[in-house]
Image (tube, rainbow, N blue to C red):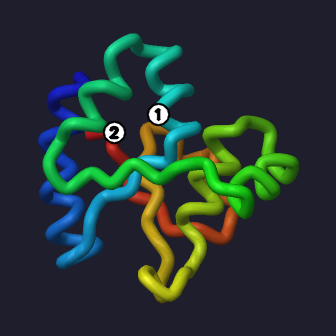
Amino acid sequence: MLRRRSRSCPRARGEFVAGRSLYAPACALVEADRARPGTAEHLAVLPGITVLDLDLAAALALARQNTWAAAHSQYAAQPTPDRPDGAIIATTAPKRWEDEPVRVLVLNA
């Protein structure tokens, strides 16, 4: 399943965020790795993946969400000078993001 989802990443990059990297918030990688050991290592070495560190601004956003992964992901999806349109959250749990101001790419295929 993980390999099938990781193969969909280049398609997502080309289709939704042309010319940009896929971003993996560090907190989301930790949570994913707890659920499925090896996930973080697998994703971190894929070409085109940029792991986003937990900086001070992201850490301050953690208090607004139920989990560190959700908070870091939502923070990373917000517009920045490098990403004026924000980033897209790739997820297998799209209902979690229904009422949030983020764009979602559903990985359930």
Assign a secondary structure to mark 1.
helix
**Residue drawn at 31 percent across, 58 percent down:** 22
Looking at the image, residue 96 lies above or below residue 82: above
Q: Position of residue 18 (x, y in %)?
A: 20, 77
Within 10 angstroms of label 2, few (less than 14), some, or many (20 or more) residues?
few
Q: Position of residue 91 (x, y in %)?
A: 44, 45
Q: Quadrant of residue 61?
A: bottom right
Q: Which residue is label 1 attached to?
A: 29
**Residue drawn at 29 percent across, 37 percent down:** 44
Which is nearer the N-term, disc 2 or disc 1? 1
Quadrant of the image for the N terminus? top left
Q: Position of residue 23 (x, y in %)?
A: 38, 56
Nearer-the-camera pick, 4 or 60 = 60
Residue 108: image tag: 2
The mark tally for this picture is 2
Q: Quadrant of residue 67?
A: top right
**Residue drawn at 33 percent across, 54 percent down:** 50
Assign a secondary structure to mark 2.
loop
